[in-house]
Amino acid sequence: MQFSKIPGRKAPIIAVVGSDGSGKSTVSEELLKLMSSYRPTALCHLGKQTGNLRRAMRKHPLGSKVDSRITKVGASSRQKGISFGVALVMFTASMRRVVRFTRMSVLRCMGRAILTDRYPQIVEPGEMDGPHLTGRHLLGFGAKVLMRTEFWLYKKMAAVRPDVVLRLNVDLETALQRKPDHKAVSLEKKIKVVPKLSFNGAPIVDIDSTEPLEKVLEQAREAVNAVMKCY
């Protein structure tokens, strides 16, 4: 695969995407060392991380009750429709990603090479870093305004095309072994969505992350080296 410098861009953006359990964090840590050998590089996590918060809550009795309540509200919302209050909570969670993306943009303008763990997209709303309110049954004008605002913000973020996307593919069995505290249903849904993702025409390198780590890193490093040499 051939890569070239994006006109007007001072430094590259390399995104690592995949479901939980695909090895994003491990791969990103190794690639950060490689990219830093070329030029100052920032590793930016662009997830909302609400899942991590809820898993941490489940470890405590009070937190477990709160998590159960959130699950019940979510199930009710899917059946009856999402009210403004619930939409506001979902919108606020999405804004965590917007804030992180803004910080990344500042670092990029300063000339830092950027390596991201996850990347916003709009082709699959509701899943894998896509806008969460789009495509939902929303109740009332206020909830719909939040949905349109969220989608507009995600569209702006997704318009910033990465130089390359390293897409880590994994099977459910491997993902569960690596993330035993995650729900199988949720992981399976994410794993199925990953191959459908695209990022504004960015070149995508598909990597089988069930392979030994060194083989995964070899493929990732090859793409990263090619992009970094363009800058």
Image (cartoon, rainbow, N blue to C red):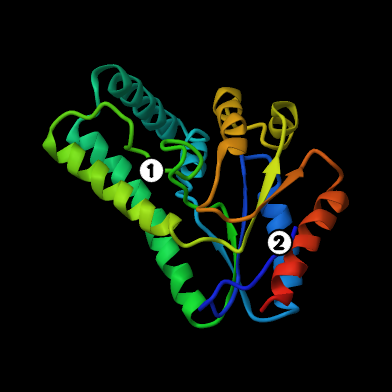
Q: Is residue 33 visible?
A: no
Relative to 194, residue 82 above or below: above
Q: Is residue 105 visible?
A: yes
Residue on which disc 1 sits: 131
| Image quadrant where residue 91 sits | top left
Mark 2 neighbour class, 10 Å CA radius: few under 14, some 14 to 19, many 20 or more: few
Residue on which disc 2 sits: 29
Q: Between residue 200 and residue 142, name the one nearer to us.
A: 200
Q: Are marks 1 and 2 in contact (CB under 8 Å)?
A: no
**Helix, strand or loop under label 1:** loop
Q: Position of residue 17 (x, y in %)?
A: 61, 49
- Mark drawn on residue 184: none
Does residue 180 appear left or right of residue 118 in this picture?
A: right
Relative to 37, residue 146 above or below: above
Quadrant occupied by the C terminus: bottom right
Which residue sits at x=50%, y=53%? 200
Amino acid under disc 1: Pro
Q: For marks 1 and 2, give the one nearer the viewer.
A: 1
Q: Position of residue 211 (x, y in %)?
A: 84, 41
Q: Position of residue 24 (x, y in %)?
A: 67, 50
Quadrant occupied by the N terminus: bottom right
Mark 1 neighbour class, 10 Å CA radius: few under 14, some 14 to 19, many 20 or more: many
| Image quadrant where residue 2 sits | bottom right
As measured in the structure, the alpha-carbon distance from the residue carrying label 1 to the one carrying label 2 is 27 Å
> Extreme top residue here?
79
| Image quadrant where residue 163 sits | bottom right
Q: Position of residue 40 (x, y in %)?
A: 64, 80
**Helix, strand or loop under label 2:** helix
Amino acid under disc 2: Glu
Mark closer to the chain start, 1 or 2 = 2
